[in-house]
Amino acid sequence: MKKTAFILGATMLPAASVMAAPSFLTSTTQTDGPGYTYLQGEYIPTGNLAGTGHDFKGFGFRGSYQLPAHMIVQGGYDRLNVDHSGEDVNRAFVGVGAEGFYDYGGRKGTGIGYYGTVNYERLGLRNAVGPDDATGTGFGITAGLRWMVDPQVEINPHATYVDYGEVSGGRADYGRPDGFKYGVQLVGYLDSDQHYALTAGYDRSDLNMGPNNQDFHNEVNVGARYNF
């Protein structure tokens, strides 16, 4: 009988450890974390194009789609109008990556999500030098957290290392800007099912574009999100 019990216990140990592992990352009794399938629109009321002395404003869109096995696809587009200047800025990205969630045992609906993507990045500067446009395409690597401090409140710090490649066109030459874009976004969910949300964010970059070391500083956005 003792020998049978030993064999039975040894056989059950691997199964028990397999069952325990997911509960450390995602507790089925708490929450699976924030949703990754959503559309978001943003208004950018203010920002500073460092190196030029001009401010800018504009609008943007974000989208995310959750795939099986915790994979995600994300993308976004921004259009910025530089004040007292004919220059406009277009920024776009599409990325693919993965996400996870750590339930630290707080109240139901709280915990820390984490995600990362590898991106295709595009930067377009319209009327950069006189009538000439400058365009560059490259890659980016994004990492972020989605901290659910409350079931209805999310704090999302994020950072992207980006390399836009050669940004040039006509007489316009902005070199090969690369560096970090980083910021934080606050998401307030309006319903218990987390379908509707209002957002507010702050972003900044250290890219040093062109001879004047242009950068996007003190960029503020407000928006609305719909989770599917």
Image (cartoon, helix red, strand yellow):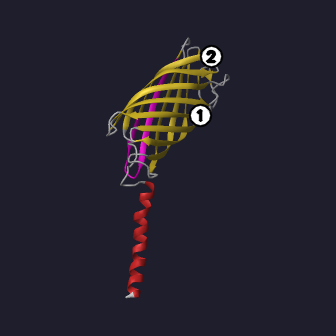
**Badge 2 is on which residue?**
53
- Between discs 1 and 2, the one toward the N terminus: 2
Q: Main secondary structure of the magenta part?
A: strand
Q: Secondary structure at mark 2?
A: loop
Q: Is residue 192 left or right of residue 185?
A: left
Which one is nearer the viewer's eye here, 208 or 32?
A: 32
Q: Is residue 89 magenta?
A: no
The quarter of the picture where residue 133 lies is top right
Query: In the image, what residue occupies the spot 48% across and 26% down?
Result: 221
- Residue 165's disc number: 1
The quarter of the picture where residue 14 lies is bottom left
Residue 49, position in %: x, y? 59, 21
Query: In the image, what residue occupies the spot 57% across and 25% down?
Result: 218
> What amino acid type is highlighted by mark number 2?
Gly
Relative to 171, say whether 192 is above or below.
below
Q: Is residue 213 left or right of residue 226?
A: right
Outermost residue, front side: 107
> What amino acid type is highlighted by mark number 1?
Gly
Residue 58, position in %: x, y? 47, 21
Q: Which residues are magenta?
A: 63-81
* Image quarter (top left, top right, bottom left or bottom right) of the C terminus: top left
Query: In the image, what residue occupies the spot 47% across and 46% down?
Result: 112
Q: Is residue 70 magenta?
A: yes
